[in-house]
Amino acid sequence: MTAKLEIKNLSHRYRKGEEFAVSDLSLDVEPREFVALLGPSGCGKTTALKVISGLLAPTSGDVLVDGESILGVPPERRRAAMVFQKSLLFPNMSVEENVGFGLRMRKAGREESGRKVADALRQVRMDGFAYRRPGELSGGQQQRVALARALVTEPRLLLLDEPLSALDANLREEMRALVKRLQREGGYTTVFVTHDQEEAVVLADRIALLFGGELQMYDEPEAFYDRPASREAARFFGATNFIEGEAKNGSVDTPLGKLRLERSASPGETTLTIRPEAVRLDESGGENSFPATVSSATYLGTQVHYELEASGVVLRAALPPHVRLKKGDEITARLPAESLWALE
Amino acid sequence: MFRGLRVPGKGIRPSPNPARERLTRVGGRLKISLLLAPAVLVIGTLFIGGLYAALIQSLGYFPAIGQTEMSLSAYREVLSSGYFVDSLVLTVYVAVASTVISTTLAVLGALALRRSSGTVSAVVFQIPITIPHLVAAVGIALVVSQTGLGARFASALGLVGEPSDFPALLYDKYSVGIILTYVWKEVPFVALVVLAGLRGVAAELEEVAQTLGANAWQRFWHVIFPVIAPGVVAASLIVFAFTFGAFEVPYLLGQDFPTMLPVTAYNDYRSIELSDRPGAMAINIIIAVITALFAAAYLRLSRSLGRG
């Protein structure tokens, strides 16, 4: 049932002369893997998903499932079930009829269909709602039914197009856990589109970050924090400190002094990045430390965000609330070698 | 014990003033009534007033010829006459045929054009709507009469010998000219209603159904049709009511006998015998009652379809 998905040099534009919505995208998704297509709105992630589902034909490139191109296969025969941002339940059918829709279209036997629908409703904890109409359900319940309706068809690919973004925060967390559990249990090869980096990190085995239709980075969630591929990727994941410098002999010369990196940078001009929460205060003045002035402080409850100025470089630091500094304080800041990363 | 934690007036909705709310409600209703009054007055005078005048004349109250006693004799006479029954059958046939053909073609046309740009559907569907029925009837006559463009084309293509061999489609017993005019005029109207439904949520639901394995026919029957059905029913009801009660097209393109009910009523109304007037009014009232019955039945059906 699970399948390997390969996207090869995929490009799509809606009209001739327009810019490409997706440009030269290549991705491999392993069987049972959960991949998030992440990016700001308009970056081409939904377009890519619709091409995989067959609802859009690509301008160029190929989509392969288990090594075979599916471009010539119509959407209804791809077995790529899709869940959209809106639940899009069929308003003229009950919950039970909605969930059984795919099986009915496939002319599955009544007994088999009834059993699978009951199972699917139980999995999404909607078994008491079989005879309700979509209009009688809350937003979260509707989305659970939409999920059951997709899963009951035992798809080779599960395509999720921001299915949680219309839900409120509490419900979204509950649904994340449900999606993750069902995906793990069913072993569906899944592509999940989202603009929420936290959602992508929580759910995905790997994240594909897209900007302007182009793939910026495709890696495990931790990599986006520890070793971002570009300034844009680093910034999208909240790293706002960029220090220009020149790498030589295993360290980097910067306006802040010589900084040592645990993971060495290739010689030449480079940009170092460090996450605000990795910046330390260190009165002992060890490795990678330098004097700095606090230029602003914003109290956020669980953290305090500071702007530090040192040798013309502005750094952002997120420190725990028990460290209380005020504007104008002179401090010694330290950038731990293990948290510094040289961008390519 | 938690009294100390409560902050008076915070987070509690201020208690409403019932008298003030009632006054606001009454003021709102008065405003709506005043705004609606001019429209209601015109419709009331022309429509309900006219209907009332027709009703009392149909019941025999016609002081102009000295009749002031009310009775159902005009109805008895009309309903028992052969020409009325022939007229009614012809009218139902034309209205049903025009509605069924228009609705079918409109749904097919809207399905074909649903992914086209707005300009294409505007040209195809909106232009015929702006042309009056009278002009459309003359246009159809110019095309399908035995001396018309269609007959000459058919003759030039060798499909018929002489243009006069072209089948008689005007003033014929099957009312082909009338039905063609109605179809030409009403297809765009129904199609625009259907198109609005198709371009809304139906398009998204169809995509879902497609990814769930539904083929083109299954998508139409199980997903699209239930969504557009209330609109289709409502639009076809309007077409039926209009074609059942309209006068000018059957008057221009219809045969001499039997005529459609509105033409029959008009002929009786124009009769030099003023005593035919209650009969003419009785036919008009019968047309109104039949149309209203169909309207009620269709609306009920439309509501139940809407509920799914």
Image (cartoon, helix red, strand yellow):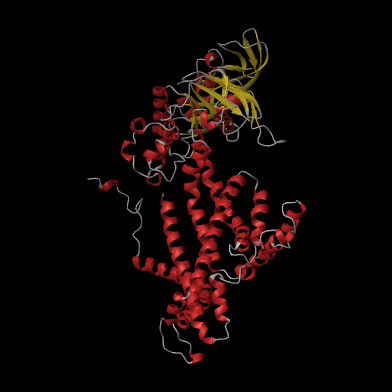
Image quadrant in which the N terminus of chain A is located:
top left
Which residue occupies the extreme top position in the image?
A249
| Residue visible at 41% across and 70% down in the picture | B26
Residue B90 spot, x, y in % from top left: 53, 66
Horizontal arrangement in the rendering, residue B222 relative to residue A72 (left or right): left
* Viewer-proximal residue among A212 and B245: B245
Residue B265 spot, x, y in % from top left: 54, 76
Which residue occupies the extreme left position in the image?
B1
| Residue visible at 41% across and 51% down in the picture | B307
Q: In which quarter of the image is residue A230?
A: top right
Please state the total of marks drawn on the protein image: 0
Which residue occupies the extreme bottom position in the image?
B66
Q: Quadrant of residue A57?
A: top right
* Viewer-proximal residue among B145 and B191: B145
Q: Quick check: can you spot residue A225?
A: yes
Residue B179 spot, x, y in % from top left: 59, 61
Q: In which quarter of the image is residue A252?
A: top right
Residue B250 spot, x, y in % from top left: 60, 68
| Residue visible at 54% across and 14% down in the picture | A337
Horizontal arrangement in the rendering, residue A208 relative to residue B119 (left or right): left
Q: Tell me: residue B170, above or below residue A264.
A: below
Q: Tell me: residue B165, above or below residue B115.
A: below
